[in-house]
Image (spheres, helix red, strand yellow):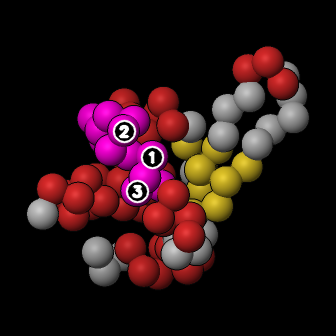
Amino acid sequence: MRTAREMDKLAKTFLIGGTDARFTAAALRQDTGLRSSRMLPLLDEMKRLGWIATEWPETDPTRAQCWYMLTDRGREELSDW
C-alpha cells in the first residue's frame, strides 16, 4: 500500500511536468516528499519497465546529475495510474 502511494506521487509529478520535463533526483524528492531510500528503487523499477529514461549530461563531470524523463510508454501507462 505504501509503495503504491509513493508510486502515485512519482507518477503525478512526471505527468504534471509535461512531455519535455526532466527532473533530477533532488527535484523529485522535493516535489514528492519521498526519501531517497524509498524513491530510488521506484525509479529503478520505472526505468526497468520502460516508463522513464535517464540522461547524464556531460557539462561538468564533478557535478554530474542524472536527469529522469517520462517516456511515451510511461505516459501511456501512468495516465491510468
Please give the residue where the numbered disc 3 appears in the rendered image.
42
The mark total stands at: 3
Asked if marks 1 and 3 touch (Cβ < 8 Å), the reply is: yes
Q: Residue 69: x percent and y percent?
A: 60, 56
> If the image is split into quadrants, where does the C terminus sit?
bottom left
For this orientation, the residue located farthest to the top is 62
Q: Residue 25: x percent and y percent?
A: 51, 37
At a point 56% along the width and 64% down the height, the residue shown is: 47
Q: Is residue 22 left or right of residue 45?
A: right
Residue type at mark 3 is Leu
At a point 73% along the width and 49% down the height, the residue shown is: 55
- For the residue labelled by badge 3, is the local secondary structure a helix, a strand or a loop? helix
Magenta stretch in the rendered image:
32-43
| Label 3 CA crowd tier, 10 Å (few <14, some 14–19, many 20+) | some
Mark identifier at residue 37: 2
| Label 1 CA crowd tier, 10 Å (few <14, some 14–19, many 20+) | some
Residue type at mark 1 is Leu
Please give the residue where the numbered disc 1 appears in the rendered image.
40
Mark identifier at residue 29: none
- For the residue labelled by badge 1, is the local secondary structure a helix, a strand or a loop? helix
Residue type at mark 2 is Ser
